[in-house]
Image (tube, grey):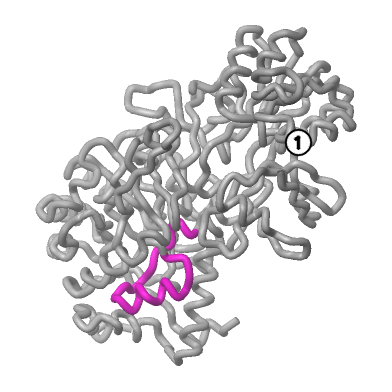
């Protein structure tokens, strides 16, 4: 294995600096603790918690998961205990997590996002907030926010007013022009963007003659959406100059490097954790091996270098330290 | 049928009846498969399954000497303590993979075990003789009548003297029938549920079942919604896969 101390693979998300660019994605890595018996979480850049809403949600009926070619559909439906219970019973446990913990907020109105964001961001266990404005699996408006630049801006602005902590807007790929949404989020104060959430999809059982998911429709993830996600990162990286967490079907170090070269500063690993809980660590090993082989001392040197219109190329020059 | 033996001495020491494993596919690129842990003895565990699709085909293609990564043991397992002496184990199809360890544990404490075992065909009624050798009394059923009772296995259960307690693992319609049978007679019944899994370790909330919030298996669950409903969605992989029939609200 490569001596990783000789290479800098850190990633910056607003004021948050992650020692590694690998992020365990919301709903795919629990709070980290669920995977702790099997992996070394101190070798993960950060974990993004499952989204929390203002009120408790029971989530969708089962089946919630259907395995599909090169990926899977899910429709969990934002099952969560609601912010009050979460603050009282769950958040304190996250202090034990050996990597940065990023909270995730979902809602059904602009006010919901601001309300939950303010309360969650106030907690010292939470290093940053992801605004999940792109959940495709809830009955009302879940995804509407990130499909409309004005709604995106209103949610981000309202959340921005409640906290100084890094705000990450998670964008939907189910839009005509993701760059427009990205600009709206950044203009409203997002420190970083997560690109992308799942692609809407469905599957039908031909013998039961019914949709396979309890929710009928779901979000497609896994290798099947990787080229879609990569293009979204490429386009967003040309439109805005904030850090991007590239996500969508990343399974290997090679996949991760494609996203970094397209303009992502960090990469999110979701469905690949279900293939192997060690995926984020295996990907990190591969990134270090690539850096050694290609003589890349700092991962930031290569971010966006395959993207001629990369808007963020001077991002780190003015950094203190 | 595939019976995959694995050298896993640490797993043998930690596994309890009703635990399962997530078998990571050799070469990756698809989610792991949740499999019942069939045998555990000495240095070896075994996993029993049928080839039903691409993922099980890839597992079935493993050859002697190759490495298989298991995330295991997982789940809560069956409670095999208790004082019941006359116990029915009901298994359907691949559910048989999860009931040998509890059968052995119960036989070891002197219980009488009647195994009610159903499958589509005689050919699919695998390992029945193994259970007889262990000391279980067999009650077999097949959908096509090619062996044992022609019909579903719960019909056999209804025809015979009721046991004191029931353990069951199999397809959901069978488990629902077992649950109804047990609740009509006020018998304690533990059901090991089937559900589509994502991670298998509690991180994705993909595999859930509605259960009473007052259940011991939902100790720290909040009310499921704002109106204070007494039903919550528990995870089959962590709070289960074994649930008490009378606590399910499915």
Total numbered badges shown on the rendered structure: 1
The answer, for residue A87, to whether it is visible in the render is no
Q: Is residue B111 above or below residue B73?
A: above
What is the quadrant of residue B134 in the picture? top right
Q: Residue furthest bottom?
A: A295
Q: Which residues are magenta?
A: A250-272
Is residue B86 found left or right of A47 in the rendered image?
Answer: right
The answer, for residue B55, to whether it is visible in the render is yes
Pick the quarter of the image with the C terminus of chain A. bottom left
Q: Position of residue A247 (x, y in %)?
A: 36, 63
Depth check: B118 or A302 in front? B118
Q: Residue at x 22, y 78 (%)?
A: A312
Q: Is residue B155 above or below residue A148?
A: above
Depth check: A88 or B183 in front? B183
Depth check: B46 or B183 in front? B46
Residue wearing tag 1: B126
Q: Residue furthest left?
A: A150
Q: Is residue A75 above or below residue A129?
A: above
What is the quadrant of residue A222 in the picture? bottom left
The magenta stretch spans residue A267? yes
């Amino acid at each position: 294995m490569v001596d990783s101390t000789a290479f800098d693979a850190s990633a910056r998300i607003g004021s948050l600096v992650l020692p590694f660019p690998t992020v365990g994605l919301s709903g795919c890595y629990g709070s980290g603790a669920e995977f702790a018996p099997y992996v070394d979480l101190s070798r993960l850049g950060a974990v993004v918690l499952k989204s929390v809403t203002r009120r408790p949600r029971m989530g969708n009926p089962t089946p919630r998961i259907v395995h599909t070619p090169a990926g899977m559909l899910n429709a969990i439906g934002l099952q969560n205990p609601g912010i009050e219970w979460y603050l009282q019973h769950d958040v304190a446990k996250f202090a034990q997590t050996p990597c940065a913990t990023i909270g995730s907020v979902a809602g059904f109105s602009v006010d919901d996002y601001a309300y939950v964001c303010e309360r969650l961001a106030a907690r010292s266990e939470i290093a940053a907030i992801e605004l999940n404005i792109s959940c495709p699996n809830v009955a009302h408006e879940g995804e509407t926010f990130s499909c409309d630049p004005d709604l995106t801006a209103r949610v981000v602005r309202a959340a921005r007013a409640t906290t100084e902590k890094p705000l990450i807007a998670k964008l939907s790929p189910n839009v005509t022009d993701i760059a427009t949404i990205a600009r709206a989020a950044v203009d409203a104060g997002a420190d970083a963007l997560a690109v992308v959430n799942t692609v809407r999809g469905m599957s039908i059982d031909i013998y039961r003659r019914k949709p396979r998911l309890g929710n009928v429709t779901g979000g497609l993830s896994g290798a099947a959406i990787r080229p879609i996600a990569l293009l979204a990162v490429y386009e967003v990286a040309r439109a805005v100059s904030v850090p991007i967490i590239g996500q969508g079907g990343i399974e290997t170090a090679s996949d991760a490097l494609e996203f970094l070269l397209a303009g992502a500063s960090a990469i999110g690993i979701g469905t690949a954790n279900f293939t192997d809980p060690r995926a984020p660590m295996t990907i990190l090993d591969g990134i270090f091996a690539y850096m050694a082989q290609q003589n890349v001392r700092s991962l930031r040197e290569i971010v966006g270098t395959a993207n001629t219109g990369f808007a963020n190329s001077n991002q780190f020059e003015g950094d203190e330290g | 049928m595939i019976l995959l033996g694995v050298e896993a001495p640490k797993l043998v020491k930690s596994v309890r009846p009703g635990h399962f494993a997530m078998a990571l596919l050799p070469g990756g690129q698809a989610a792991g498969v949740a499999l019942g842990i069939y045998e555990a003895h000495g240095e070896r565990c075994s996993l029993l399954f049928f080839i039903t699709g691409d993922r099980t085909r890839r597992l079935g293609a493993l050859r002697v000497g190759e490495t298989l990564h298991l995330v295991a043991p997982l789940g809560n397992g069956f409670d095999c303590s208790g004082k019941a002496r006359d116990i029915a184990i009901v298994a359907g199809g691949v559910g048989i993979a999860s009931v040998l360890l509890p059968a052995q544990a119960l036989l070891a404490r002197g219980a009488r075990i009647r195994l009610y075992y159903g499958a589509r065909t005689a050919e699919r009624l695998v390992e029945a003789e193994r259970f007889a050798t262990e000391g279980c009394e067999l009650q077999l059923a097949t959908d096509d009548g090619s062996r044992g009772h022609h019909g579903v296995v719960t019909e056999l259960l209804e025809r015979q003297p009721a046991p004191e307690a029931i353990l069951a693992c199999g397809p959901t319609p069978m488990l629902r029938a077992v649950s109804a049978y047990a609740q009509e007679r006020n018998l304690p019944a533990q059901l090991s549920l089937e559900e589509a899994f994502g991670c298998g370790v509690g991180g994705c909330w993909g595999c859930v079942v509605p259960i009473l919030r007052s259940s011991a298996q939902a100790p720290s669950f909040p009310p499921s919604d704002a109106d204070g409903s007494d039903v919550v969605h528990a995870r089959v992989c962590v709070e289960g896969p074994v649930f008490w029939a009378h606590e399910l609200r499915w």
